[in-house]
Image (tube, rainbow, N blue to C red):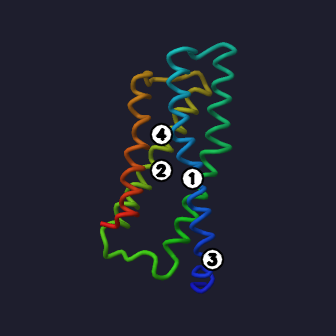
Amino acid sequence: MSDILSMAYPWIKGFHIISVISWMAALFYLPRLMVHHTERVGLSGETHEIFAMMEYKLAKVIMSPAMMATWIFGLLLVATPGIVYWGDVWPWLKAGGVIAMTVFHVWLMRRMRGFQVGENAVTGKQYRMMNEVPTLLMILIVFSVTVKF
């Protein structure tokens, strides 16, 4: 198995990067939709239904599959011999960042489900602040992998 992973390493890495880009795009966009849904649309009416549908499709068709692919390809990279030395700090920082990103993903999914049933307890300002979470985690993850501290 390790020989197959070593030979497939460039492909796995490429698919991992593609998955991460897709996941990050959705993690950046969904909170912005929620800001406008909260501040401009409300929780009923035709425009609410359109926003709820857009949020649902973004979360279910793009964001969740991209997260799953990111995890699968990332775990394959971790399983590839010689790629990760767990005695270093960087893999632990990256792992913590990815877990935190996954927690943020779950939080967004819960907010999306709330909008689906006409509920929302988060303000537009709070969504704006939460929209910075993936950026901060992305910085941690990228520099932990590229600088390898």
Amino acid under disc 2: Thr
Does the residue at mark 3 contact the one at mark 1 (Cβ under 8 Å)?
no
Q: Compare marks 2 and 3 and give the one earlier in the sequence.
A: 3
Residue 133 at x, y percent in the picture: 40, 41
Does the residue at mark 1 contact the one at mark 2 (Cβ under 8 Å)?
yes
Q: Quadrant of residue 16?
A: bottom right
Does the residue at mark 2 contact the one at mark 3 (Cβ under 8 Å)?
no
In percent of the image, x 45 and y 43: which residue is there? 104
Does the residue at mark 2 contact the one at mark 4 (Cβ under 8 Å)?
no
Q: Compare marks 3 and 1 and give the one earlier in the sequence.
A: 3
Q: Compare marks 2 and 4 and give the one earlier in the sequence.
A: 2
* Residue in the foreground of this view, choosing between 100 and 142: 142
In percent of the image, x 50 and y 24: which residue is there? 35
CA gap between label 3 and label 4 equals: 34 Å
The residue beneath circle 4 is 107
Q: Quadrant of residue 53?
A: top right
The residue beneath circle 2 is 102
Residue density around tag 2, few if under 14, some if 14–19, many if 20 or more, within 10 Å: some
Which quadrant, please, contains the C terminus?
Answer: bottom left
Q: In the displayed structure, does residue 4 sit left or right of residue 96?
A: right
Q: Compare marks 3 and 4 and give the one earlier in the sequence.
A: 3
The residue beneath circle 3 is 8
Q: In the displayed structure, does residue 32 sit left or right of residue 117?
A: left
Q: Secondary structure at mark 1?
A: helix
Residue density around tag 1, few if under 14, some if 14–19, many if 20 or more, within 10 Å: many
Q: Which mark is residue 67?
A: 1
Q: Secondary structure at mark 2?
A: helix
